[in-house]
Amino acid sequence: MSEEKSLNFLEEIIENDIAEGKNGGRIHTRFPPEPNGYLHIGHATSICLNFGLAKKYNGQCNLRFDDTNPVTEETEYVESIKNDIKWLGFTWDNELYASDYFEQLYAFAVKLIEKGLAYVDDSTAEEIAATKGSTVAPGTNSPYRDRSIEENLQLFAAMRAGKYKDGEKTLRAKIDMAHPNLLLRDPLMYRIKHAHHHRTGDAWCIYPMYDYAHGQSDSIENITHSICTLEFIHHRPLYNWFIEQLGIFPSHQYEFARRNLTYTVMSKRKLLQLVNEGHVSGWDDPRMPTVSGMRRRGYPAEAIRQFCDTIGIARRENIVDIGMLEFCVREHLNKTANRVMVVLDPVKLVITNYPEGQEDIFDAENNPEMDNGSRKVPFSRELWIEREDFMEEAPKKFFRLAPGNKVRLKSAYIVECTGCAKDADGNITEVHCTYLPESKSGADTSGLSVKGTIHWVSTKHAKTAEVHMYDRLFKVEDPSNEEGDFKSYINPDSMQVLPAAYIEPALASALAGQQYQFMRKGYFCVDKNSTPDKLIFNRTATLKDAWAKESGKR
């Protein structure tokens, strides 16, 4: 019997809460992205966590868009986020928006003003920053801090009515300008932004700050476990302060550590730079750590979920080797992707004793892991093989084609190399061999045993395809912590285009998103821009971790 997996610290908290009957044993989580960009692998961890906990404990999980900044948010991002969550295999119980609560949040703010716990400030952003103080020095009170409740109510209503320009006034909570936690030194609650909102249009010109809107939105939805990343741990006292002063449902915030990945960046700002400056083709470029980019590259949703489960949840931040994600991808695709033969760097192989005009049809195994049958592969006198599978002068332990060497053509015959032909510049144009008719795969009576097996595609039947050879986007493990501009560490070989690879004819009908193992070459999927007239395949992963080998890790 396999050992049961131990609980992470959040599962321990939830099980204790259930045992104590807290919230009636009810579990309600939420995933609250801001729709100002595309989700990345870090968000996938949070998605798996929040939706996974709700599922495990028979609870609910809301999808709530934190759409409180109309300047950066777009409906495009909303739709992409929903698509990514569905693709990852999760379904939300309620689709909600912070903008759903704008009226309620405004009423909460009025209540705090009436309690003498919020005030309208005329100070500029620079003036407010200058009075914040530091970790060793207290801040100083705003000259507008002691306005009367009546004046604050009038000014806040005027802010809502659009009587002031952007930045002319803010609403601040009145807490303590000497508080040791700088976030509680009269934080901003509302700012003026005369900007069109993707859902509310021009109905509002004041928008709540994240620290104010977040906890109240959780409370309105009766969220029992508000789970966020570790950088918000210092925001928790403010989260609690608003809820306590308003006397509303006591949602509770819990923090877990981010899991950053090697050889990439996870900052939304930096990812946006890569897109806007043309270093990648878009948010779904297969080199990007976005969920849409990984999907386009061919990463299975199951592999991403397995990765998130494998790295687990902790209270301390660390960097996870991207090789772990790639391992999960390979492990899944090895079990699910059909094997096919594709020649990426072709040279012609001529079987000189194979009758001209003759053809064979061989049964080639699809995937031995799945036991899902075979496919028909045509064979003829002339084949395409990989250029690297032939050497005119080969070392002793070279078990592929060289003069006098024998190899098996996968699923076909044993052949013996007899030499090659060259052009005027000495470049090899053809490899020549003879075949053993009695060595037919599955019915071999030759009695020969050869050490090498190579793949091939019949020249007469081959189709062509464009193949994009993707690799890691950066050439250093932690580009954000290196000196200078992080973009200077972009891997120049992160994408190579092979315009004319040769594929089995059966692949001509491959559809976007379908995944294959190109035998001996790696895992590939059909790109979304592929068409019947121009097939495009993206390399998802190599068969083995070439980076680990290069860095001496094995």
Image: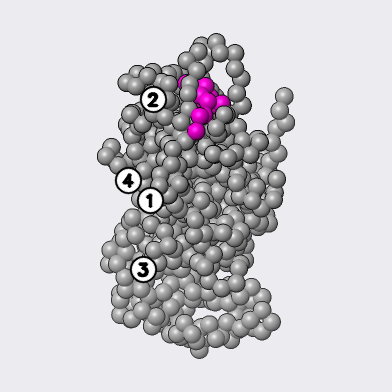
Residue 174 spot, x, y in % from top left: 54, 76
Which residue is pictured at 54% across the width and 64% down the height?
489
* Residue 318 position by quadrant: bottom right
Residue segment shown in magenta: 406-419
Kindly indicate whether the residue at mark 1 contacts the one at mark 3 (C-beta within 8 angstroms): no
- Judged from the image, the secondary structure of the residue bearing numbered disc 1 is helix
Q: Quadrant of the C terminus?
A: top right
User: Residue 71's mark?
Assistant: 3
| In front of the other: 249 or 305 | 305
The residue at which mark 2 appears reads as 381
The residue at which mark 1 appears reads as 80
Kindly indicate whether the residue at mark 2 contacts the one at mark 4 (C-beta within 8 angstroms): no
Which residue is pictured at 53% across the width and 13% down the height?
444
* Cα–Cα gap, marks 4 and 2: 34 Å
Dot 4 crowding, Cα within 10 Å, few <14, some 14–19, many 20+: few
Q: Earlier in the sequence, mark 3 or mark 2?
A: 3
Position above or below: 278 against 527 = below
| In front of the other: 513 or 226 | 513
Residue 127 spot, x, y in % from top left: 50, 86
| In front of the other: 257 or 434 | 434
User: Residue 529's mark?
Assistant: 4
* Cα–Cα gap, marks 4 and 3: 31 Å
